[in-house]
Image (spheres, rainbow, N blue to C red):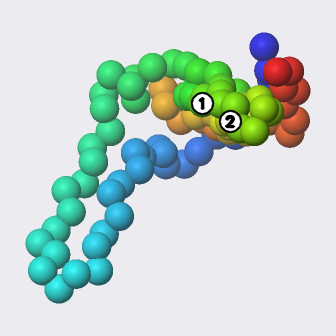
Amino acid sequence: MLKGLQVGLNYPVLPVQKPIPTSVNFEGNEFKVPNKNIYSLDAGYPKSSVRILHTNHIRGNNVVVVEVSSVTYNPAKNQLEVFKSIDISI
């Protein structure tokens, strides 16, 4: 299991909001409220720092798309865990 630097926060990390359109007819954008089931968990999010999104073959070569998160967020503790390095084996 990875261990990173624990950083306490003064304010909670809120969910990503929809972008605000630059249209004259824009009537407002509903604020996305944090899900209480998720924000009460005492565990880091995302659960895994590395995940394979998909694999493919291009011109005879194997291609792997990997998502790497160098930070996890624990909403119950309002704390970030920051990783200086992550080893990945494919």
* Element at label 2: strand
Q: CA distance from mark 2 to mark 1?
A: 6 Å
- Indicate the amino acid at tag 2: Val
| Residue at (86, 39) in percent of width and height | 84
**Residue 4 can be seen in this image:** no
Question: In which quarter of the view is residue 51 placed?
Answer: top right
Mark 2 or mark 1: name the one nearer the start of the chain.
Answer: 1
Relative to the observer, which residue lies in front, 41 or 20? 20
Estimate the x, y position of residue 25 in percent, counting from the top left.
12, 80
Say the numbered circle drawn on residue 53: 1
| Residue at (65, 28) in percent of width and height | 55
Estimate the x, y position of residue 19 in percent, counting from the top left.
35, 64
Question: In which quarter of the view is residue 5 placed?
Answer: top right
Task: Tell me whether circle 2 and circle 1 mark residues in contact (CB < 8 Å).
Answer: yes
* Element at label 1: strand
- Indicate the amino acid at tag 1: Leu
